[in-house]
Image (cartoon, grey):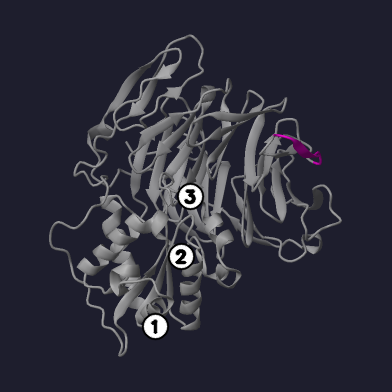
């Protein structure tokens, strides 16, 4: 257990985790970025080769050979849904809010509802789908027929066809400004995206071709300041991303990352962290700013106390239509669409995943906890002013306030502290607090919270941010939605890399509170 056996076909990352889909050994793995510890290892539920993975919060989607698309709860290593409909190998998956998109060798793109599991839209493209990428309502697909096709993902209408590649397009990525593709002609292409900034652009326009790779380009990534590509020449290349008017952009190759001993199948970019997966059976983390290797992950023994043999793999019989949902899985059955031939789905039953029960929901402290000693400057009465929206974050913030108080901190939280929600009382609470803590949830930016945030800025209070990270909670939204809803004067305050994801699981919660208290101490 632990060592990767075979090529890593796809990687994904969050601020805390690196995920890898390993083809030959049919596995999904997750490592901690902090220390490289392998924290999760599970076989694909249909015991088929893992081709692709995407992650959002604590949920991951895995796509496999023979049509498998599975939604996995990373915190419990259980399968929530099996999305059925593809008749070929699933080559790409992406997640966007409540939607999951998958592309397949069966020449279709399917869009699924993450909550109900329903296939809400099928797009027939007439050729094998290699890669998908999404930005807002725009869905881009890199295809075997040497094109990139762009669709409206709300209705499936085709918006554009990009035909400049001279070979199959294995890689595609998109943001508000540009679309990047990679092809077997060894080239990376940059297209300008039609927008209000480029009113003269009706369609996507090719603006640059990067010809530095010497073999097929298999993956591209795009995020903020960088464009990254991985190729069959065993290298990863890093360029500066377009800034200002993309039509005037002059690309500069910043780094050539060498270290993999075989083709680089996948790259993922989050801020300045690049994660790469290769046929050399390893996953690596690089610094995009310096080009230096930060960590190599080739598979290690799980360092958390996981039950013997991952609580063993349980063979679950599958009838023509219904996958029997085992203990620990989603309460709804997942409708299946496989052929009449019976097959077995290998499903991980982690009961518990951690022997000490530490994956259970965090509750109120029942024993003694370590007290933090944080002095307050003259005139201050509270360590933290906790700003939130009660309707969708009340439970989390009430628990957080109690935990912090038990650890020796003084917390201002709504009427619990002042007896009312009067504006003057809230402003006074902010002035008398060491720092301002904002809990991001779906409806957080009410007029009251906007007022509190504005007051914190006016008082020049240090601002800490925690966000709802559990997609199953009513307050969850993609981090980009939190930023989009923020007042214009405060958008610069929100960075997913700096914001702390709120943790409810016991094995993560204690580390969360320790880190939060240290941040409060340091501001």
State how far apart marks 2 and 1 are (Cα): 24 Å
| Image: magenta residue range | 156-164
**Residue 98 covered by magenta stretch:** no
State how far apart marks 1 and 3 are (Cα): 38 Å
Residue 498 badge: 2
What is the x, y in percent for residue 302? 30, 44
The residue lying at 50 percent from left, 64 percent from top is 446
Report the front residue among 444 and 426: 426
**Residue 163 covered by magenta stretch:** yes
Of labels 1 and 3, the one closer to you: 1
The residue lying at 66 percent from left, 53 percent from top is 175
Q: Which residue is mark 1?
A: 431
Residue 13 badge: 3
25 relative to 219 in the view: left or right: left
State how far apart marks 3 and 2 are (Cα): 15 Å
Can you say whether 93 is above or below 276 in the image?
A: above
Task: Tell me the element at label 3.
Answer: strand
Dot 2 and dot 1 residues touching (CB under 8 Å): no
What is the x, y in percent for residue 214? 70, 45
What is the x, y in percent for residue 282? 46, 44
326 relative to 103 in the view: left or right: left
Label located before the other in sequence (1 or 3): 3
Label located before the other in sequence (2 or 1): 1
């Amino acid at each position: 257990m632990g060592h990767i056996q075979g090529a890593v076909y796809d990687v994904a990352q969050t601020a805390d985790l690196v995920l890898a889909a390993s083809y030959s050994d049919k596995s999904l793995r997750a490592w901690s970025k902090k220390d490289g510890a392998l924290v999760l290892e599970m076989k694909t539920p249909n015991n088929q080769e893992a081709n692709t993975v995407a992650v959002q919060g604590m949920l991951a989607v895995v796509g496999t050979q023979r049509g498998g698309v599975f939604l996995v709860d990373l915190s419990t290593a259980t399968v929530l849904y099996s999305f059925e409909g593809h008749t070929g190998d699933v080559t790409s998956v992406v997640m966007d809010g409540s939607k999951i998109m998958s592309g397949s060798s069966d020449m279709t793109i399917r869009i699924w509802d993450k909550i109900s599991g329903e296939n809400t839209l099928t797009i027939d493209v007439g050729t094998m789908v290699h890669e998908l990428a999404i930005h807002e309502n725009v869905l881009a697909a890199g295809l075997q027929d040497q094109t990139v096709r762009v669709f409206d993902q709300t209705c499936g209408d085709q918006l554009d066809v990009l035909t400049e590649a001279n070979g199959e397009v294995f890689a595609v990525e998109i943001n508000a400004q540009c679309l990047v593709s990679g092809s077997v002609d060894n080239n990376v292409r940059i297209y300008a995206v039609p927008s209000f900034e480029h009113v003269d652009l009706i369609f996507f326009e090719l603006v640059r071709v990067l010809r530095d790779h010497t073999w097929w380009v298999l993956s591209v990534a795009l995020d903020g300041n960088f464009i990254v590509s991985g190729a069959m020449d065993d290298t990863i290349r890093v360029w500066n991303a377009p800034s200002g008017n993309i039509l005037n952009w002059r690309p500069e190759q910043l780094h050539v990352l060498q270290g993999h001993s075989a083709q680089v199948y996948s790259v993922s970019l989050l801020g300045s962290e690049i994660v790469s997966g290769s046929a050399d059976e390893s996953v690596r983390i690089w610094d995009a700013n310096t080009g230096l290797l930060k960590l190599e992950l080739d598979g290690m023994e799980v360092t958390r106390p996981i039950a013997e043999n991952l609580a063993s793999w349980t063979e679950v019989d599958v009838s023509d239509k219904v996958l029997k949902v085992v203990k620990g899985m989603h309460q709804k059955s997942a409708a299946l669409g496989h052929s009449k031939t019976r097959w077995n789905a290998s499903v991980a039953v982690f009961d518990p995943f951690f022997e000490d029960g530490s994956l259970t929901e965090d509750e109120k402290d029942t024993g003694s906890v370590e007290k933090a000693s944080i002095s307050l400057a003259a005139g201050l009465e509270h360590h933290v002013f906790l700003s939130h929206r009660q309707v969708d974050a009340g439970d989390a913030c009430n628990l957080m306030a109690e935990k912090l108080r038990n650890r020796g901190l003084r917390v201002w939280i709504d009427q619990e502290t002042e007896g009312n929600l009067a504006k003057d009382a809230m402003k006074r609470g902010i002035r008398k607090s060491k720092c301002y803590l904002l809990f991001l949830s779906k409806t957080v930016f009410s007029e009251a919270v906007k007022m509190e945030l504005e007051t914190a800025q006016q008082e020049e209070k240090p601002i800490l941010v925690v966000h709802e990270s559990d997609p199953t909670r009513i307050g969850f939204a993609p981090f980009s939605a939190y930023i989009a809803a923020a007042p214009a004067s405060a958008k610069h305050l929100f960075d997913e890399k700096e914001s702390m994801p709120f943790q409810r699981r016991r094995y993560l919660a204690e580390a969360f509170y320790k880190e939060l208290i240290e941040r409060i101490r340091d501001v």
